[in-house]
Amino acid sequence: MPEKDHHIHEFGAPAEARELRRRKRKRCLLYIVLFAVFQTGIILLFALTVMKIRTPKFRVSSVAFGAFDYSAAAANPSFNIMAIVELSVKNTNFGHYKFQSTTVYFYYNGAVVGSAYVPSWRARARSTRRITVEVQLSSAGLVDRVQLANDLSAGVLPVNSRSTVDGKVELMKLVKKKKSAEMECFIAINVVPRTVGYLSCE
């Protein structure tokens, strides 16, 4: 009887070894598949976040005032205002945004009442470049002043700012893509007490 058990053990051992090797191969294959899925996920995440190039935002951030003269007289309404305007170029990309010089125009009732030159600059990756400019807002060139008299009498001077800045987003010095950021802002100036009552940008 012991002899018989010995032979059973000898014949059973190779089968167990083969089963063990098969399980190891399956486990190894599973690890490879899981690693491949993980790598694919990382690459996909990288492509959707880091490599995705978004359009920067060009905005008027704040407005303060220096010299501030106006007249609400119906016969000859006018304004002459020194505005200190903070502009911002917000770059949410993982690469820097190098933009060209541009001009920001300020409008009242569709007519240009002021402008500001913005020099070429660079907004670093995931940062905001802030630029302060002085703008002389003047009604000197306005032809139709009926609405101006009404607005100044009401105490609110509505002004719009528009501009476009052209540039390139550069990722890791490998990918470069042109991106243009447009500005469209509305500013409600309270003539008394000479502050901004409302500021909104699209």
Image (cartoon, rainbow, N blue to C red):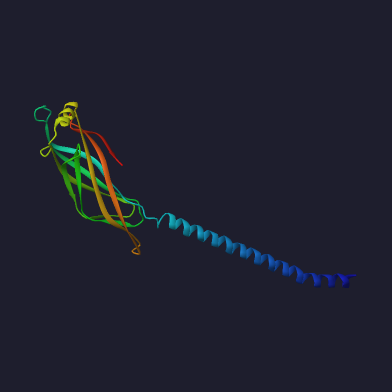
The residue located at (23%, 39%) in the rendering is: 160
Give the image location of residue 83, x and y in percent. Answer: 16, 40
Front residue of 75 and 11: 75
Determine whether 184 is above or below 79 in the image. below
Which residue occupies 81% across, 70% down? 9
- In the rendered view, tell whether residue 125 sits above or below residue 184: below
Residue 68 seen by the camera:
no
Residue at the spot 31% in from the left edge and 55% down from the top edge: 179
| Residue 126 position within the rendered picture, expressed as x and y whole percent measured from the top left | 34, 52
The one of 142 and 104 positioned closer to us in this rendering: 142
- Across and down, in percent, residue 102 comes to 21, 52
Query: From where the camera sits, is residue 176 visible?
Result: yes
Front residue of this view, candidates 136 and 158: 158
200, above or below 73, in the image: below
In the current view of this chain or complex, which residue is farthest to the right? 1
- In-image side of 168 versus 138 (left or right): right
Q: Horizontal and vertical percent for residue 47?
A: 43, 58
Image quarter where the N terminus lies is: bottom right
Q: At 27% from the left edge and 45% from the top edge, which residue is drawn?
A: 183
